[in-house]
Image: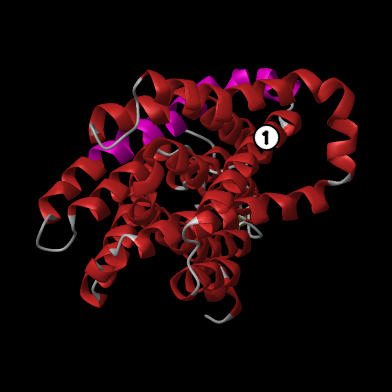
Amino acid sequence: MAALLGTVTLAALLPATGRGATVAGGAADVAITLLFFLYGARLSTGEAVAGLRQWRLHLAVGASTFVLFPLLGLAARATVPFLLTGPLWTGLLFLCVVPSTVQSSIALTSTAKGNVPAAICAGTYSSLVGMAATPLLAAWLIGSTVSFSADGLLTIATQLLAPFLAGQVLRRWIGGFVGRHRGVLGRLDRLSILLVVYTAFSRGVAEGVWRQLTPLRLLALLCLAGALLALALCTTALAGRRLGFRREDRVTLVFCGSNKSLATGLPMAAVLFGASAGPVILPLMLFHQVQLMVCAVIANRWSVAARLTAVDGVEVEPEDRVIVDRAVRDP
């Protein structure tokens, strides 16, 4: 979070212009290619195939990610121009078609004592489906703003899909190296994302886009991001109960179905929106910070609740266990 804020501040004070913008843009393209190559090299095909046994859970996660969220994004159109500008709503709608995150969903599910293997598979499937679904949904829902011509398709194929497939093919030889150096490569991931953010925000500064962003609109965007997350959390929690999932699977559905991937979304936005990506990535960045803070609180609370499995031989719902535990200790 600090690095993202620092990068945005740097872009505002020292934006890349002229030849510097060309160099930064080229470096960002290389970083995006490397990022998706590493995604492919990390992805365990065996784990992905093994996870097919829980297809109902994965379908529920996919429905939340690629059906519920886009519908909520379309409904947010009613806030334009009273709360949001057109470009900010475009960014909010793009956020709604981005796949689920992998790393944070797994961490949150693990903290909350959920089904971690299912979370790994759910995040993996979401990323794989998102390679095709995100550009298609963005082109369909957003329209002419998205670079989805023949050149746009070629760019997506060469910058996103081809490196990912190359990583999968070479995983047999480099998978061990990638696993052993996960920490170093993770920092490389973050540097790549920061470079994409710096390039996109620099373009926005050069074009005067950020002068249109008033504090009131920024606050409205933050509130809408929070409302979007709240609706997704409530809907996935309710759906998990209605579908009869076990407690561990409900935890997985809530976190995987409500989170969005900054690491995948930012490079995709840079490819799809090109020079106009600046205001488009802002809603995704804000949503990502909100989801981390809110979901971390929920995960910690559920972790404590999971420690009490039953009271006096009667099974207690996980969400109620903290209250019951306190009542037992302090009648």
Of residues 202 and 185, the one nearer the viewer is 202
Q: Image check: 26 left or right of 11?
A: right
Residue at the far front in the pictured view: 19
| Residue 131 painted magenta | no
* Residue depicted at x 23% and y 31%: 143
What colouring method underlies this structural image?
Answer: secondary structure
> Residue 112: where, in percent of width, then height?
61, 54
**Is residue 10 something that shows in the picture?**
yes
Over which residues does the magenta segment extend? 46-71
Q: Image check: 292 left or right of 227?
A: right
Q: Image check: 138 left or right of 78?
A: right
> Residue 147: where, in percent of width, then height?
34, 31
Classify mark 1: residues with Cα within 10 Å, few (<14), some (14-19) or many (20+): some
Looking at the rendered image, the quarter that the N terminus falls into is bottom right
Q: Main secondary structure of the magenta part?
A: helix
* Residue depicted at x 43% and y 38%: 240
Q: Which amino acid does label 1 sit on?
A: Tyr
Number of numbered discs overlaid on the protein picture: 1
Q: Name the element at disc 1.
A: helix
* Residue depicted at x 34% and y 22%: 149
> Residue 234: where, in percent of width, then height?
34, 50
Q: Name the residue under label 1.
A: 39
* Residue depicted at x 69% and y 29%: 40
4 is higher (above) or lower (below) than 155: below
Q: Image check: 315 left or right of 62?
A: right
> Residue 268: where, in percent of width, then height?
47, 38
